[in-house]
Amino acid sequence: MFYKGKEGQWSWIFHRITGIGVLLFLAIHIIDTMLVGWGPEIYNKVIAIYRNPIFKIGEVGLFAAVLYHALNGIRIMIIDFVPEFTKYHRQIFYLEMLLFFLSMIPVSFLMLSH
Amino acid sequence: MIQVHLKIQRYNPEKDSKPYFKDYAVECEPTDRVLDALLAVKGTLDGSLTLRKSCAHGVCGSDGMRINGRNMLACKVLIKNVSQPIVVEPLKGFKIVKDLVVDMKQFFEKYVAVKPYLINQETSPEKERLQSQKQQERFEDTTKCILCACCTTACPSFWSDPNYVGPASIVQAHRFIFDSRDQGGEERLNLLNQREGVWRCRTIFNCVEACPREINITRAIGEIKRDLLFKKI
Ligand code: HEM
Ligand code: SF4
Ligand code: SF4
Ligand code: FES
């Protein structure tokens, strides 16, 4: 049975997923940019795939992953440098979630309507 | 009296190829502890159910186990406060000896490794070694540990790396490192300043949620990390 951790365990799982996810995106992005070396035709062909609406949603997801990872990274660093704040780690996590959703609402709107 | 349903993980290495769950129902008071229900199973239904317990009052630390997915002392949690069926499993990450009894040899080896005793080369004074109230408060929180291992076996860093020294040993080290009467801080800090020392901790807080003594373990680990970062280098 899965161990029933609370906020701390979830925040860590998401941090790892988003960290590895962004790393994966960077790897793919480096490869598609490298295709320029084989000439503009191949490059344009591959880049055209990204016009598919699925990638628009994917871009919002990428932004969400980076934003979560950055906000949570800051939370971890705050707790690392000021261990006294461990007492309020749950509150800091909810504050982080609030900032996350407050930023995601206008950003998703702007990105999807673009 | 109410009917209490339990789902207990059983494993006898001499007979079973792998652990399995078995359902039981016993009569208990809602204000009884989960330990009482387990002992009722053992006493009236199946005497072969194997578990550790001693004080039955949250003092000795011998009945740490996973109850409904979270580590706790069976003697400290009331039946009316947990949902049924009560799922009972052994602590995660240790080798199972039988049913709910796990092998804690390595756990105690790591405990001994952090030198959990007073180190002071000076000749002892005639009476006790004095300390101010403030100096005592510096490490008061970590004196409360009963070595139940609920923290270490709730820690994802420990599950993925059994060599991680683990929160329980770090708590014990903290208790002496920040004691004004102790002089062994340096030795202990060197031991913890390793990959498998305090730096394995990812501030996940599972240990704090699990600790039956409500010790702020992640804070203790954080204080040692900060000490290592700013005092030593
Ligand atoms: C936006 C700025 C970023 C900040 C503030 C940040 C912060 C952090 C912090 C503090 C950790 C340590 C977590 C811990 O101690 O448990 C971490 C881990 C990690 N980061 Fe980032 N990071 C950032 C960007 C990135 C990017 C761009 C990538 C991918 C290319 C990335 C990939 C990872 C990975 C894979 C881990 C390891 C996850 C783990 O151990 O569970 N990070 N990050
Ligand atoms: S805070 Fe550190 S020691 Fe405690 S459970 Fe998390 S990783 Fe393990
Ligand atoms: S720190 Fe708490 S959970 Fe860990 S061994 Fe000590 S009493 Fe048990
Ligand atoms: S039996 Fe001693 S702590 Fe539970």
Image (cartoon, coloured by chain):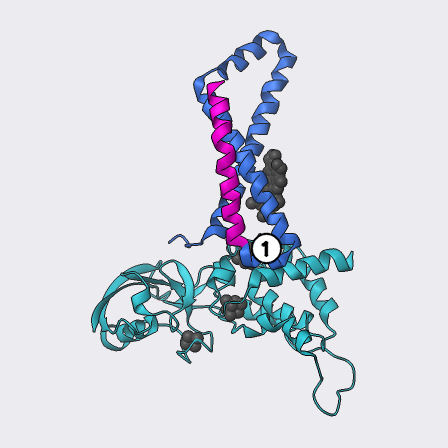
Chain colours: A blue, B cyan
Q: Is mark 1 within 8 Å of ligand 2?
A: yes
- The kind of secondary structure the magenta stretch mainly shows is helix
Observer-nearest of A64 and B168: A64
Q: Position of residue A33 (x, y in %)?
A: 62, 19
Q: Is residue A51 magenta?
A: no
Tell me what residue is drawn at x 59 percent, y 67 percent.
Answer: B171
**Element type at mark 1:** loop
Q: Is A72 displayed left or right of B4 in the figure?
A: right
Q: Is residue A111 magenta?
A: yes
In which quadrant will I find the N terminus of chain B?
A: bottom left
Pointer 1 local density, CA inside 10 Å: few below 14, some 14–19, many at least 20: many
Residue B141 lies in what quarter of the image? bottom right
In which quadrant will I find the C terminus of chain B?
A: bottom right
Extreme-bottom residue of the structure: B126
Q: Which residues are magenta?
A: A89-114
Tell me what residue is drawn at x 69 percent, y 63 percent.
Answer: B191
Tell me what residue is drawn at x 76 percent, y 60 percent.
Answer: B231
All told, the count of numbered labels is: 1
Q: Which residue is mark 1?
A: B201
Q: Is B144 displayed left or right of B51 in the figure?
A: right
Q: Chain of mark 1?
A: B
Q: Position of residue A18 (x, y in %)?
A: 53, 37
Note whether B134 is above or below A94 in the view shown: below
Q: Is A38 displayed left or right of B184 in the figure?
A: left
Residue B157 in view, yes or no: no
Q: What's the amino acid at mark 1?
A: Cys
Observer-nearest of B196 and B73: B73
Note whether B113 is above or below A62 in the view shown: below
Q: Position of residue B38 (x, y in %)?
A: 31, 72
